[in-house]
Amino acid sequence: MDFDQFEAVFGFKSDIAYNQQTIDDIVRHRRALENVLFVDRLLKALGIEKASKLYPPQSALDLRNLHRRIISSESPDHHKQSILYYILKELPHSSRHAAEGFAKASYLPEKYRIFIDGIWCMDKFKFEKALEYLTEPALIPTFPEEILYTLCRHAPENDTSLPLAYFHTVSPCIVSSKVLEAFFFILCRSSITEAFFFSREQGEFIHHNLFEKLVNFVLVNSTGTIRARRSVELIDLPFDDVENAWFEEYLKDGKGRTLSGASDTIIMKGLATGNTTFLLEHGKNIAGRKIDGVNWATIRESLQHGPELETGSLDVSMA
């Protein structure tokens, strides 16, 4: 197939073009993806700037112009054919068959077709289907950070499985701070413990930053029984001396000092580790509601007067 010829790719119908509903959907999805579709990135890789001005083509003439810009690129043929395959998938009237026919006629390698199918699904917000393609072992990860970030941003409130599945399957190297923050938020939603150990795998500066975000997440982004469960998980984590110092500094003197439950969290961590210093030093300003006749004030008084404190017999909730 001579894909340089427009008719060889799109047929001889002179008015062939995207319908208005398709155009509207593409524009809406681009807006939801922070104004960059994955096909925009492919066009940019071909040296075609301002992709949003060219795609989606608004008319038959625009489609011809887009085809001309693609074939004029100095990129390898398979790259140009891949984008033409993507464009064909959006055309009305049996577009799937037209795209598949083009892929076969142009001998587009299977791995290119699989990748484009995945990227097309990402742009269509068919994320679960996209992962079936993009986690194919034969593929060399392309746009891995962008894919991970998109999956994180659009993960349902009660389901973090897709971004986690992509991360653990592809193992993308995360360089962007924006992507790292989005993924760490997903980790926190999934497991406080997993997020904690992930933070430890980073360099000291990033480790410190993520550690504070972890504590903040538990106190700010959790409520009710979920907050109670996450709080217990947080204070049970095996902090080392450095992390203990970060923990107290953040909640006593740092940005976390004004968070609801900050002092309670320090006390609970102290009781869990046998460190009652904070409660003894600051407990006079902390009381909290009584549960079974016990609050922080009564615990502090017991510590000051020396009777043995049997923490197992106390049922103390964080305020």
Image (cartoon, grey):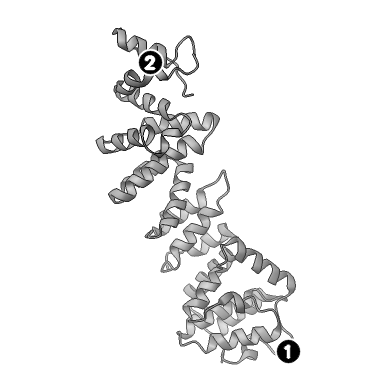
What percent of the width, then of the height, locates residue 9?
Answer: 62, 86
- Asked where in the image residue 53 lies, by quadrant, the reply is bottom right
Q: Secondary structure at mark 1?
A: loop
For residue 135, say whether it is visible: no
Q: What's the residue type where badge 2 is placed?
A: Gly
For residue 18, say whether it is visible: yes
Earlier sequence position, callout 1 versus callout 2: 1
What percent of the width, then of the height, locates residue 239?
Answer: 30, 35
Q: Which mark is residue 131?
A: none
Q: Residue placed at 46% from the left, 47% from the top?
A: 185
Tell how many labels.
Answer: 2
Q: Is residue 239 above or below residue 187?
A: above
Q: Residues within 10 Å of mark 1 (few under 14, many from 20)?
A: few
Q: Residue placed at 47% from the left, 18% from the top?
A: 288
Q: Which of these two is toward me, 282 or 70?
A: 282
Q: Which of these two is toward me, 259 or 211?
A: 259
Q: Residues within 10 Å of mark 2 (few under 14, many from 20)?
A: few
For this view, does 252 lie left or right of residue 164?
left
Q: Which of these two is toward me, 21 or 269?
A: 269
- Asked where in the image residue 96 lies, by quadrant, the reply is bottom right
Q: Secondary structure at mark 2?
A: helix
For this view, does 249 lie left or right of residue 32?
left
Q: What's the residue type where badge 1 is placed?
A: Ser
Check disc 1 and report the residue beneath it: 14
- Asked where in the image residue 263 lies, by quadrant, the reply is top left
Quick one: quadrant of the N terminus?
bottom right
Q: Residue placed at 57% from the left, 68% from the top?
A: 120
What percent of the width, then of the height, locates residue 64?
Answer: 64, 87
Alpha carbon distance from label 1 to label 2: 81 Å
Check disc 2 and report the residue beneath it: 312
Q: Is residue 247 above or below residue 28?
A: above
